[in-house]
Image (cartoon, rainbow, N blue to C red):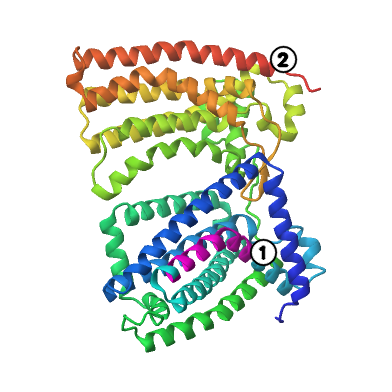
Amino acid sequence: MRWPDRQRAGRIARVELRRTWRSLRDSNRGILLLIAGLLVVPLYSLAIAGMGYLGGREIATAGPDRIRLVATSLVAFLLGLPGFVVLQRTVKLNGEPDAADGLLTTVPYEDILAGLLAAEWGRLLAVAAIPLCALTAGLTLGSGLPLLGLAVLVTSLLVTLFGLLASYAVGLTVKLAVARSAFIARHRAVLGGVTSLVVVAVWLLAWGTSGVQLAILRAATQSPLSWVGELVLLAVPSVDAAPLAAAVAAVALLGSLPVAGLACLWLAERVWYGDAVQPDHEFDATERTLSDRLLGDRVSTATRVVAQKSWRRAKRAPLTVQFAVAPAFLLVIQLQTLLLERTVPPTLPLTAGLATAAAAGAAFSLNPLGGEERVLPLTLTADVSGKQFVTGLALAGLLPGVGLVALLVVGLGLAAGTPPAVLAAGLATALVATLAAPWVAAAAGVVFPKFERSTVRGTSVTVPSGFAFGLYLLVLAAVTAPGAVAVALAILAPSAVPVATTWLLAGGVAATALLAAIAAPMGYLYAANRVGGYRLE
């Protein structure tokens, strides 16, 4: 372990920043992010400057407890948000250098790590510099205390830098665990999904209401985290700061920077130079799996093989189906109510069922041709008809989707105390949506196929077109609208409907079933004909 060379680290940082700029400049998504940043960051900075000015005006009259609460909140924010972003990027994207084999054999890893960290620091500053300067200027002008603005700026930069180093070290620890543990490597998709759900649940529970936020921040003011805020309070003459706590915080903050840097060096050497375990993906052609027993005598061999191929690909490369969870964001508000109020919202069973149906239908069928990627020529020349191929993709989403939808709707409906008739109608609507979704998705996917690869979490994969996803959701929403509206009216406003609830539910479900009976065969036949007649140019 040696001290990094500044020139080499600087060159690596510049190359990384150029790559970031090029990726933003050369893609539609990057251009949208740049436009959003140019619009949002100045507006937020103006708001922050105004809040800083008003806060500075009130410092002379505000109580010390309130000032400590605000200072601790700022420290927690600067540690939490940038740290979470860096942790995500380290695990998914920036935890290893590009072209690692060539770079690690020609440049000392200390220089590479220093360059990567410097580039990450530069990205953070590019986003946070204007808001921090606005906060500093607002506090200085409002309080008339130049030392206060300087203290806030310096402390904020140090806290953010420590959060970057600590989060990068945690990210490397996660990568080291994945590289050393065959179990974690084999189940990293499931573990990552569970972790993401837990993080979202904790976030909603912790920050869903102002009362919970205030309780957490008051507890933080009684912890060593508040000592960092004492560094800022030393610059406020009207507040009796704790010099000892401020001195301890200064020593701890400055001392933690080299400790976190050494931890990053130690972890980087083991992650970058170590041999990662390779999960066993052996295939036994004689083994009779659960899918063989379920599909063996019920569908053709070609259809069964297409479905099994889809499941294996999703298991080994979860990023190829990750896009399908997008409809789950419809549940965020209702899940927040569930976590905070400990009650199941009455419309949650139907919403969860429809979101799951949309996800199951899109997962394997939304890009039938482009999803084959490099093996598309083999697929087109194999002894598989277009109908068999589309049916196999649809079954890959249908079989797990039907069971999961039924489990969610019934379980949540019983927990919410939904009346039996309403629960039955919601279940029927969700199941009809599940049965129709894959065929609608396949038709949308052949109307808007996508063969170009996209970068997802640093990995190049082929994902469906956004136009295909939009068309799919639009048609599926039209199909499910009668049943969903009938169930929602029966739950939220039964007295507003001039007919009996039973007739309302029956009519809504029947209309949805009729629309599904029209849309699903049309989508199936159209997609099968397009796939069967497709020719490579």
Dot 2 corresponds to which residue? 533
Pinpoint residue 152: horizontal percent, then vertical percent.
46, 73
Residue under numbered circle 1: 119
- Quick one: label 1 or label 2, which is nearer the N terminus? 1
The secondary structure type at the circle numbered 1 is helix
Tell me the residue at 31%/84% (across/down). Answer: 240
In magenta stretch: residue 29: no
Does the image show residue 298?
Answer: no
Q: Would you say residue 58 is visible in this rendering?
A: yes
- Magenta residues (range): 119-140
Specify few, some or many for label 1: CA neighbours under 10 Å numbering under 14, 14-19, or 20 or more. many
Looking at the rendered structure, the kind of residue marked 2 is Gly
Are the residues tagged 1 and 2 within 8 Å (C-beta)? no
Corner quadrant of residue 66:
bottom left
Q: Is residue 134 magenta?
A: yes
Q: Nearer the viewer, residue 306 or 349?
A: 349
The quadrant of the image that shows the N terminus is bottom right
Measured along the vertical axis of the image, is residue 92 above or below residue 367? below
Residue name at image x 68 percent, y 42 percent: 27
Q: Residue type at mark 1?
A: Ala
Q: Nearest the camera: 189 or 463?
A: 463
**Left or right placement of residue 202 versus residue 170 in this view:** left
Real-space Cα distance between discs 1 and 2?
A: 49 Å
* Left or right for 93, reference 87: right
User: For the point 34% across and 85% down, which residue is it?
Assistant: 242
Percent x, y for residue 303? 60, 23
Q: Which mark is residue 213?
A: none
Question: Residue at position x 61%, y 47% from top?
Answer: 34
User: Would you say the magenta stretch is mainly helix, strand or loop?
Assistant: helix
The answer to which of 272 and 401 lies nearer the viewer is: 272
